[in-house]
Image (cartoon, helix red, strand yellow):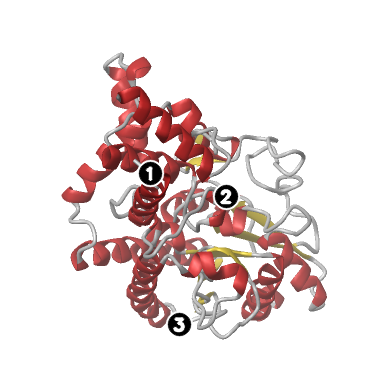
Amino acid sequence: MTEQQILDALAVAIAEEIGAKGVIVTRDTQAADIGGWDSMGHGRIIANLEDALGVELDMDRAFAIANVGELVDLVREAIIARA
Amino acid sequence: MKNPVLALFSNARFPYPYSMFHDKPRSLGGFGDELGFRNPHSPLIPKPAGEKRIFMLGNSAVHSLPAPSEPNLPLATQQAFHERGQAGVKVYNYGIESGNSGQSLMLFLDQLIDLQPDLVIAYDGATDLIVPFHYDPRPGYTFNNYILEVIHEAIAEDKLADLNIVKSERERRELIRKRVNFGSSDWRESLAAAYVNRVAKFCHLARCFGIKFVHIMQAVYRKNLPAEAEKRIAAQTEFLAFGYDMFERAAGGIRGLKHQFSDSNCFRFDDFSRAFIDEPEHRFKDWAHVNGIGNRIVAGMIADLTYEMVAQ
């Protein structure tokens, strides 16, 4: 899975959670840049992403990320671990 | 990003009887009073001579600072009264972070009527009408009730250590969403009706106890042209459309109350939800919270609306 595919899946997971259309995220995007992305919403976004990609993320690390790039890296690690 | 469990149990959501939760006493770095509200000190009894005592109830739009250097809405409103020549006015912040009208109603009944108010202002709407889109969707419920249910069951079944709050929270929310027919017109009407019903109870209680009461539907992000800094808020199109629909539904019910309680100078009703619709400048931090300048504008509107009631 490419980085762009992970970013696209994340954009869908965010859009589902916050009630938005056309969400665009990059590695530098932070939760504060997206209206409605609060701490509980973050948990749901992570869960949506896990369902969409069929991976299981380390929750402690998922809640410690500083930006989308770190979340993408975490997903890639989980994909590798799954394989 | 804070773990959502910790966020749920922050010092701004300390448990109390009836009102469910508000600030832990003296917990906000000198801004929290001994009763658990965001004031330098709690109201004195008896009320000092010359003090015009106003209590402001509501959610985080009342409770919180727009920025560390800015006054919160009650304090900005107090300043607005002073600027208009009413130096004796003191406005107490009884806002609850994430609180809804039911919690405010219980505060009013259980505490405020004993604190000799000259006026009580309820400035709210967002948590009752829009937060159910993301949190507990049941009409009238606090935003976090379903999460407390999940935790309660985990404790009762001795499975707290196994609880995956992220998964459990989402599953419970989906279950309840199906039960309430989330998104339907009937569900929306029930949410609006629960809110209007609370405001009606406020009015009846205020009349019963001889307390002047003002209800204001709060300013929410609704602008014809977003400022650059507000574009991330404007992007929440589906969410905002839901919010506007909810405010319209509730406003109809509030108009009925305005007619019902128009017989004296003890009541005022207003709707600030469109207050910034033609404002091109940056005024919103998010869909329910204005920045410092926005807060001062809202405070001035509140002082203008209630000036005569307080002067009498």
What's the chain of the residue with tag 1?
A: A
The residue at which mark 2 appears reads as A28
Q: How crowded is mark 1: few (under 14 residues within 10 Å), some or many (20 or more)?
A: few
Q: Where is the N terminus of chain B found, in terms of image quarters? A: top right
**Closer to the camera: disc 2 or disc 1?**
1
Q: Position of residue B145 (x, y in %)?
A: 36, 40
The residue positioned 37% from the left and 42% from the top of the image is: A44
Label 3 secondary element: loop
The residue at which mark 3 appears reads as B262
- Sequence-wise first label, 2 or 1: 1
Q: Is residue B203 left or right of residue B175?
A: right
Q: Residues within 10 Å of mark 2 (few under 14, many from 20)?
A: few
Q: Distance between the residues labelled 2 and 1?
A: 17 Å
Q: How many marks on residues?
A: 3
- Give B175 or B109, whichever is nearer the viewer: B175
Question: What type is the residue that disc 3 sits on?
Answer: Ser
Q: How far apart are marks 3 and 2 (CA)?
A: 54 Å
Badges 2 and 1, same chain? yes
